[in-house]
Amino acid sequence: MEPNPNTVADGYSRTDERIPVATSTTPVAPPLDFDYNDGVADPSFDNDTNSETYGSTRTDERIPVATSTTPVAPPLDFDYNDGVADPSFDNDNNSETYGSTSGRGHIVSGRSGRDDDDDSSARASQTGVDAHLQHPNRPHLEQSHEGEHRYDHGDISALKITRATKLYAFCAALNSCNLGYDIGVNTGAGMLVQSSLNLTDLQLEIFMGSLNLFAMVGALGSNWISDKLGRRWAFRIAAVGFIFGTVIQAAAGGYPSLMMGRTFVGLGVGFGLAVDPVYISEISQAAHRGQLVTWSEIATNIGICLGFISGLLFSGVDESIAWRLMFALGAILPTCVIYFSTFVMPESPRWLVSKNRESEAQEVLKMVYPDGYDVGVIVQEIREGIEKESIAEHAIGWDVILFPSPAFKRMLMVGVGTAIAQQAVGIDAIQYFLVYILDESGIKSRNAQMGILIVLGFIKLAVIVLAGHLFDKKGRRPLFFVSLLGCSISLFLVSFAFVGGRSSEGFAVFGLALYMAFFSVGMGPGAWLIPSEVFSTMIRAKAMSVATFMNR
């Protein structure tokens, strides 16, 4: 009988890297404790020489293979390895340090005789099992979801962020400026609106807080728009909502028309918050996603600063006109978003693959990844992830969210819980009523209030930029703990400024500045970074809608 050409000499099938094939000379390796294996065949495989260095196969770098001369290595304690090929590997000398990679990231055992100093210096550039261990010069990065090329993980210096990726992430993040501007402009205009339209405290509170209610509705609808019409159409619809809302608010003659404009603005906020992190995560390389997804939060804070600046800009204008001009300026940013989403931003590669437009997806990925990168493999993995998602969708639909399995339940608890925690620390209440807090502390001058708002806004923005780098270097959890602890202490300081019937201007401003800084170092950007990473492709669109809904 002719030997099966799909059988590799080391005991594994070419067509299925997960199934051991028994041979007459090689026993089957005992079962290993791992959950996920998605090896990709090595195109450099030679039919005449299909034996590898002990301990790995060409098609699967994660499964040690028993041979007749060497015992099986002890089980390794890891769940997922997405190594990158070591360019320094020499085919004539394939003995590497244990845990390093050869060829296309295959785990190789056997030591080459290097001393410990060489091992420690080389580990920073290696991307096998050892490269997933903690190292002072290299962050611990893992794949965030299925459906993307695993070789783009590892050493950040191996892949640079392309200019196109930065441009597309910037355009997507600009949509978040709309939310930030609304927060900033309402902080400065709230007292002016109340005075001009003779609103009661309750009416003003409803006006401020209703944004979150309408945003919840917009977030739930963003799932359908984003999946059916595409990410770019979701951006346009969100921008149109902002334009209508700001124009109606600026021309409002009473409370009903003011609330009508608020409705459109809230819907736009909901659409935008749900689609921004999804688009950026799908258009960016996973190794740099932590930095790029935080651009959305950075843009939100830029918008807040712009809103504060508009208050200072019109501080010399009559109060009944100033707040209308401040609202009207909010139509500029969404107009830019419509332009960018139509003429600059490409569609998400994942959405294009889902619509059987793989050639277009490859063209987009060629711009996102460096020249010569194998984008065809990325498209294939995206296709496989979408097929899994489609099977699950037809089988259970929203049941995967409403009645999740233990694994999905953990994803939802982390992702949705993080989004809830961002609002639980009281950021919206603080930001919307900053002017009232300053007024109660004794700062009555309108120019002084606007100046302090701008300083607080830039403090928040500067720390957000710093956090974008710290998330990839220090990890998510440590920054979250620091942020939560710092926010608690800062709010105590603010409250003490009003204890005893006497207010302290300096104490209140200092506490507010600390609060903005601690919030921005963790809870601000992390609330959207974590959900975009933790949700599997199978539930990502729906789960992001739920996370945005609960965040509002």
Image: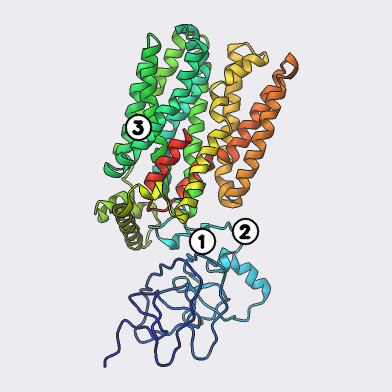
Q: Nearer the viewer, mark 2 or mark 3?
A: 3
Say what secondary structure mark 1 lies in: loop
Is residue 152 among what the camera can see? yes
> Label for residue 137?
2
Q: Position of residue 444 (x, y in %)?
A: 63, 11
Q: Residue at the far right: name it.
A: 500
Identity, as a three-letter code, of the amino acid under mark 2: Asn
Residue 237, label in figure: none
| Amino acid carrying mark 1 in the image | Gly
Q: Earlier in the sequence, mark 2 or mark 3?
A: 2
Q: Is residue 5 above or below residue 336?
A: below
Q: Mark 1 or mark 2, which has the lower sequence index?
A: 2
Q: Nearer the viewer, residue 277 or 91?
A: 277
Task: Name the mark on residue 238.
Answer: 3
What kind of element bears circle 3? helix
Residue sitting at 68 percent across and 25 percent down? 494
In the picture of the structure, the residue carrying the numbered disc 1 is: 154
Q: CA distance from mark 3 to mark 1?
A: 36 Å
Residue displayed at 35% across by 52% down: 367
Other-residue count near label 3 (Cα within 10 Å), few / some / many at <14 / 14–19 / ≥20: many
Q: Amino acid at mark 3?
A: Ala
- Look at the picture and state if 542 lies above or below 328: below
Please provide percent x and percent y for residue 65. Answer: 47, 81
Q: Are marks 1 and 2 in contact (CB under 8 Å)?
A: no
Residue 322, compared with residue 351, is above or below; it is: above
Label pair 3/1, CB-CB below 8 angstroms: no
Query: Residue at point 32% right, 37% down?
Result: 234
Vertical relation: 5 (above or below) 36: below
The answer to whether any part of residue 167 appears in the image is no
Q: What secondary structure is found at the residue carrying circle 2?
A: loop
